Image: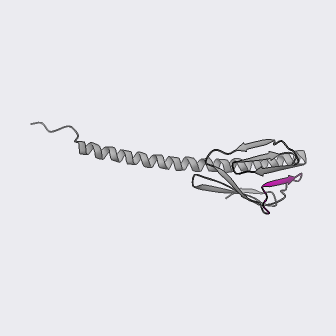
C-alpha cells in the first residue's frame, strides 16, 4: 500500500501562517528602516544647505535660512524677498527648532558666522536627528 503523499489542510495552514508572520515582520522592519533613512537623509541635506547659505553669505555679503514646520528657505542677501532656494520636506517628516528668543531664522554675515546658535530637529517615522549650529559656525548632526 502506498503512503499518502499530499499535505493535509492543517500542515498547509501552519506553513502559510508562518510565512505570513515572517512577511509581516519583514515589511514592518523595512518600513522602519526606510522611514529612518528618509529622516537621516533630510538632516544631512539640511546640513549641506546650511553650509550653502554660509557660502552665499561670503559671496553676497549676508544670507539667511528661515525655518517652517514643513520647509526651509535660503535667502541671499539676507534682506532679499525672494528665496534663492526653497526645500519642502517629504510627507511624514517635520522640523522643529530652538534658536533662542522665538527666532525662526539664522542670519550669516560675510564672515560666515551665524547671528545665533541653536538646534533644528528633523523628525518623523519615530526617529529624530538634531542639527546643531554653534556660534563658531560649526554644524553637526546628533
Q: Is residue 103 magenta?
A: yes
**Quadrant of res 82:** top right
Q: Is residue 31 left or right of residue 135?
A: left
Q: Is residue 72 left or right of residue 111?
A: left
Q: Is residue 125 magenta?
A: no
Image coords of residue 90 (percent x, y): 64, 44
Which quarter of the figure is the C terminus placed in?
A: bottom right
**Quadrant of res 99:** bottom right
Magenta stretch, residue numbers: 101-113
Q: Residue at x 40, y 47 (%)?
A: 22
Image coords of residue 62 (percent x, y): 88, 49
| Main SS category, magenta section | loop
What is the residue that sits farthest to the bottom in this orientation?
101
What is the residue that sits farthest to the left in this orientation?
1
Image coords of residue 63 (percent x, y): 85, 49
Image coords of residue 108 (percent x, y): 85, 53
Q: Residue at x 45, y 47 (%)?
A: 26
Amino acid at each position: 500500500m502506498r503512503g499518502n503523499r499530499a499535505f493535509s489542510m492543517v500542515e498547509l495552514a501552519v506553513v502559510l501562517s508562518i510565512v505570513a508572520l515572517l512577511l509581516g515582520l519583514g515589511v514592518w522592519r523595512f518600513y522602519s528602516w526606510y522611514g529612518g533613512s528618509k529622516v537621516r537623509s533630510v538632516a544631512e541635506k539640511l546640513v549641506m544647505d546650511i553650509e550653502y547659505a554660509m557660502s552665499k553669505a561670503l559671496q553676497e555679503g549676508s544670507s539667511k535660512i528661515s525655518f517652517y514646520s514643513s520647509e526651509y528657505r535660503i535667502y541671499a542677501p539676507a534682506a532679499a524677498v525672494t528665496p534663492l532656494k526653497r526645500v519642502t520636506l517629504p510627507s511624514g517628516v517635520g522640523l522643529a527648532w530652538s534658536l533662542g528668543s522665538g527666532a525662526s531664522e539664522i542670519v550669516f554675515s560675510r564672515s560666515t558666522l551665524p547671528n545665533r546658535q541653536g538646534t533644528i530637529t528633523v523628525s518623523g517615522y519615530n526617529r529624530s536627528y538634531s542639527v546643531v549650529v554653534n556660534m563658531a559656525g560649526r554644524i553637526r548632526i546628533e
